[in-house]
Amino acid sequence: QVQLVESGGGLVQAGGSLRLSCVASGNIFRISNMGWYRQAPTKQRELVATITYGGSTNYADSVKGRFTISRDKAKNNVYLQMNSLKPEDTAVYYCSCKGRLGPWEDESEYWGKGTQVTVSS
């Protein structure tokens, strides 16, 4: 099993910054992609940013230039630095990863339970 635990959420004023962290633990052979998604009330979950094992990144248009995703492969951690936060960034932020439990296992996707980010105007 793989567990993902997010931290770093909270309440911040518009224009402020937060740094989210996520640690993956368990019987992991290898993690490939890691990413952050978010879900606001009454809305569907949406991609925020992803990062591949090789370090290639992808961002939602709404966060480009403001958010930065990074990872520590040795520690199976992924981070999301969020700057210039806006009220519309308010959501529960979820960490996700794709990984294998063994060299011959199929890749599966795993999710954390989420951390709340609230941006006040």
Image (spheres, helix red, strand yellow):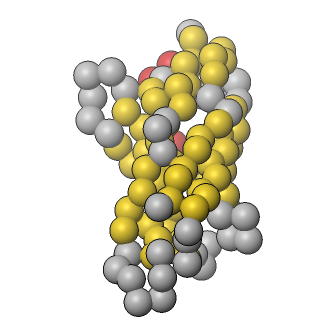
The percent coordinates of residue 117 (x first, y second) are 55, 25
- 40 vs 44: above or below: above
- 65 vs 34: above or below: above
In-front residue for pair 118/99 = 99
The percent coordinates of residue 77 (x first, y second) are 67, 58
Residue at image position (46%, 38%) is: 113
In-front residue for pair 10/86 = 10
Q: Residue furthest bottom?
A: 104
Q: Is residue 31 left or right of residue 38?
A: right
Q: Residue furthest top?
A: 121
The percent coordinates of residue 63 (x first, y second) are 51, 42
Quarter occupied by the C terminus: top right
**Residue 7 appears in which quarter of the rendering?**
top right
Residue at image position (56%, 68%) is: 27
**Residue 98 appears in which quarter of the rendering?**
bottom left
Q: Is residue 85 left or right of residue 92?
A: right
In-front residue for pair 7/15 = 7
The percent coordinates of residue 97 (x first, y second) are 48, 61
Residue 47 visible:
yes
Residue at image position (48%, 88%) is: 103
Q: Is residue 19 left or right of residue 33?
A: right
